[in-house]
Amino acid sequence: MTASKLAKALKKDGFVLDRVRGSHHIFWHDVKRLTVAVPFHGRKDLGKGLVRGIIRDAGLTREEFLKLLRK
């Protein structure tokens, strides 16, 4: 999965881009009060473990995340 696809799903859940620090985009969710960092390294795919960790940090289940991808 690419970082841009992951970022789109996070935005659909209510996360907004807060800042960019180097190659990492930091997203903030005002209601959940959570910060999530997504590394953007060109068009490279993110590793499975990294994606799972970001989903977990965002307070989402796998099913909720997959539903966001389908929207």
Image (cartoon, rainbow, N blue to C red):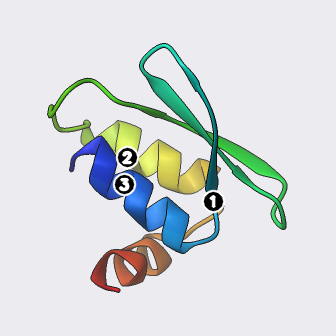
Mark 2: few/some/many CA within 10 Å (<14, 14-19, 20+): some
Which residue is at 62% across, 48% downward?
Answer: 57
Dot label at residue 15 = 1
Mark 3: few/some/many CA within 10 Å (<14, 14-19, 20+): some
| Residue at which label 3 appears | 6
The local secondary structure at tag 2 comes to helix
Mark 1: few/some/many CA within 10 Å (<14, 14-19, 20+): many
The local secondary structure at tag 1 comes to loop
- Residue 69 picture quarter: bottom left
- Residue 26 picture quarter: top right
- Spatial separation of the CA atoms under disc 2 and disc 3: 8 Å
The local secondary structure at tag 3 comes to helix
* First-in-chain label (2 vs 3): 3
Which residue is at 76% across, 50% downward?
Answer: 34
| Residue at which label 2 appears | 51
Compare residues 65 and 71 and report the one nearer the observer: 71
Q: Nearer the viewer, mark 2 or mark 1?
A: 1
Which residue is at 58% across, 72% downward?
Answer: 13
Query: Percent position (x, y) of residue 29?
Result: 73, 58
Disc 2 to disc 1: CB gap under 8 Å:
no
Is 19 placed above or below 16 here?
above
Query: Percent position (x, y) of residue 31?
Result: 84, 67
Task: Kindly identify the amino acid type of the residue bearing the numbered disc 1.
Answer: Phe
* First-in-chain label (3 vs 1): 3
Disc 2 to disc 3: CB gap under 8 Å:
yes
* First-in-chain label (2 vs 1): 1
In this rendering, would 36 be left or right of 31?
Answer: left
- Residue 5 picture quarter: bottom left
In this rendering, would 23 be left or right of 25?
Answer: left
Task: Kindly identify the amino acid type of the residue bearing the numbered disc 2.
Answer: Val
In this rendering, would 59 be left or right of 2?
Answer: right
Compare residues 25 and 66 and report the one nearer the observer: 25
